[in-house]
Image: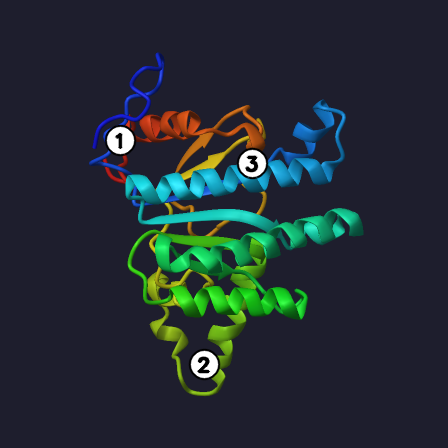
Amino acid sequence: MPLFWPEKKNIAQVDFDKLPRHIAMIMDGNGRWAKKRGLPRTAGHAAGAETFRTIATYCKEIGLEYLTVYAFSTENWRRSAEEVSAIMDLLKRYLLEAIGKMERDRVKMEFFGDLSPLAPELRELCRRTREISKGYDGCQVNICLNYGGRDELVRAAKAFAQDCVEGRADPNHLSQERFGGYLFSRGVPDPDLIIRPSGELRLSNFLLWQCAYAEFYFTDVLWPDFSKEELHRAIAAYQGRSRRFGGV
């Protein structure tokens, strides 16, 4: 596949025949983006939602198999009611648009996290997008919603313990692969590349189990300003590394 935007200089060279199978992104920096412009934080989330649309569409176009994004964490409920409401409204709007375009785009959508605290209307939209797209075989977009890596691990441990109590599992036969089947991400390969914009150098409770051998790419670019070109840089950096998975 040829490089996009060939007229632009200093764009990272990407081998589109050797893309990572799964890219995960922490969509961070919306609030700071808005503050720099004298805007309310909600304006930053709206701009960030547009960036997500652009990047998710582009990932599908270049043939990425899996894209996972951190949309709302278990800790984000601590934010103001106004900000939480704005984020949920943006998500609802996005899902309504996605449902209308699913047959054309054929993007499979999944949700990682505990959806039970969400408003009934939003939970129903999540259910509908899952149901409509479950037969699609193109790019799968996983939206981490009310998600936390530690919460995921605790839930998985409790579910396994319950299966042991009820005779469906034997603790002596627990393996990493079997434990992975209790996670929200079951059936999805671990991310090859995790991208974090905004200049922060931490995981923020994101995919703690799944990131064991992921490559990381950090950038100072705030999420609303994250572009296809920046995605190219991240992929090029990934392709320039040697992944040994503990070997030599």
The x, y position of residue 44, in whole percent, is 66, 35
Q: Amino acid at mark 2?
A: Cys
Question: Where the C terminus falls, by quadrant?
Answer: top left
Q: Amino acid at mark 1?
A: Ser
Q: Amino acid at mark 3?
A: Arg
Among the two numbered marks 2 and 1 on one chain, the one whose residue lies closer to the N terminus = 2
Outermost residue toward the top in this view: 9
Which picture quadrant has residue 123? bottom right
Q: Residue at x 33, y 63 (%)?
A: 177
- Real-space Cα distance between discs 2 and 1? 40 Å
Lateral position of residue 226 relative to residue 40, left or right: left
Q: Residue at x 57, y 32 (%)?
A: 224
The x, y position of residue 213, in whole percent, is 36, 43
Per the image, label 1 sits on a secondary structure element best described as loop
Q: Residue at x 51, y 80 (%)?
A: 162
The x, y position of residue 145, in whole percent, is 57, 56
Residue 164, which numbered label? 2
Residue 182 visible in the picture? no
Whether 114 is drawn above or below 240: the answer is below
Per the image, label 2 sits on a secondary structure element best described as helix
Label 3: how many residues lie within 10 Å, few (<14), some (14-19) or many (20+)?
A: few
Q: Nearer the viewer, residue 64 or 188?
A: 64
Per the image, label 3 sits on a secondary structure element best described as loop
